[in-house]
Every structure is written in C-alpha cells, then in structure tokens.
Amino acid sequence: AQSVSQHNHHVILSEAASLELGCNYSYGGTVNLFWYVQYPGQHLQLLLKYFSGDPLVKGIKGFEAEFIKSKFSFNLRKPSVQWSDTAEYFCAVNPPFSSNTGKLIFGQGTTLQVKP
Amino acid sequence: DTEVTQTPKHLVMGMTNKKSLKCEQHMGHRAMYWYKQKAKKPPELMFVYSYEKLSINESVPSRFSPECPNSSLLNLHLHALQPEDSALYLCASSQLGGEMGNTEAFFGQGTRLTVV
C-alpha cells in the first residue's frame, strides 16, 4: 500500500545533540513533502516544505530537510536541539493525483524528547 | 491573517446529541479539510472541499456530515456518535495547487471531542 513511513517512533536526546528523523514515502510521481511539528497541547505547525527546486530546504527554528528522490526520502535534521524542541514530529506527503488539493498523508509521527 | 479558527475548543456530547463543529479562514483558500486525530496518532483525512464542493470523502460514516456554506466556512455536523469517535478534530485550508503547486495546509487548533 502507498504510505509514509517514519522510522523513529521515540527519540531521546540531550540538549545540543544533533537530530535526524527519517521519512520515506512510497508514492510514484511528483509529490509535495512537508514536516509538521505539534508541541504539547498545541496545533500542527509547518516546519518546512518541499515542492520543487533545491532539494535541501531550510525551515523555521533551525530545521532543514533533504529530499532524495532516488531514495524516496525526506529526512529532517537539526544540528543542535534545544529543550524547547520537545514535541511530536510528523512527515506528510501530498500525493500525486490529489485533485490539486492539499490532501495530506501523514507518517506515524516521532516523539522527540530533549533532556536539559 | 494566516489563521484557521475552530470552535468550540472542547465539546462533550452524548451519543444521542446533535452538535456541530465550525471552522473559518480568511486567507482566500479554496480548499478546506477535516482531519481526525486520535491520541498519539497522526491526523487522518476525513473530507476535502474544493470550491465549496465535496471532492474527497474518505469513507467516513454518515454520522459525520460536512457542510461548506461559503468559501470561508466549513462545518462538521455530528449525530449519533459513538465513544470511539472521541478525538481531536482538525480543520485545515490551502490553496488549490494546480500542477502540484503550493498546497501548504494551514491547520486550526482543533476541537477536542468527547462522546459519552
């Protein structure tokens, strides 16, 4: 089945550690790719997005992601995490043939816990 | 204004009640969405409206009835719900992409629904 996979379900890091969260998708064709963050008790916020062009995209709060088409991957990175990055992170795909809508298919999410 | 506003924030309803969730956006977006999110799970798409017409229904039970009165408003009418329908209901809006253009979705804070 076509899907979005996030490899890490629960990640625990100390402050200043580097972060990489994996995301793979199984849709063929052109896709739009997103990373969303959900802080405890808050709504989904967009971290970054990829539509086309430079496969290395920079987002808010020091996050970046790299689109590797050959690997169907869109991994999220941050060189140095902070305690305030503790949150749930979702990779999402706007699959092909979505009637030109922003229909999103989400990965299962990764819970990031940053220890001070 | 990049906000999607949802009301109410919290709702408790009995299984025989009828209630409605409301969503509003003033970004000129012509696509609006309802997602359902259970605890510790990713959002799951329920409905998509494009140009005020229902374009995607992800096999949602008929006890959920969406309505799009105009391009800024989206309602979700609830009737005879079950306790397992308790969840966070998220509204989102986006431009219509056209050839996989900008389909970034903006999410509201959600309505936390409890069915008793």
Image (cartoon, helix red, strand yellow):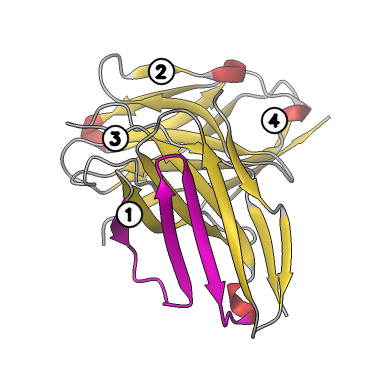
Residue at the far right: name it. A116
Decide which of tag 4 and tag 2 comes sooner along the chain. 2
Q: CA distance from mark 3 to mark 2?
A: 22 Å
Residue that carries the numbered disc 2 in the rendered image: A57
Q: Amino acid at mark 3?
A: Leu
> Which chain is home to disc 1?
A
Q: CA distance from mark 3 to mark 4?
A: 31 Å
Residue for badge 4: A85
Residue pointed to by mark 1 = A3
The kind of secondary structure element at disc 1 is: loop
- Whether B90 is among the magenta residues is no
**Tag 1–tag 2 contact (CB < 8 Å):** no
Residue A60 falls in image quadrant: top right
Disc 1 from disc 2: Cα separation: 22 Å
Question: Hey, which residue is sitting farthest front in the picture?
Answer: B69
Task: Give the numbered dot on residue B96.
Answer: 3
Res A23 → quadrant: top left
What is the CA distance from the residue labelled 1 to the residue labelled 4? 26 Å
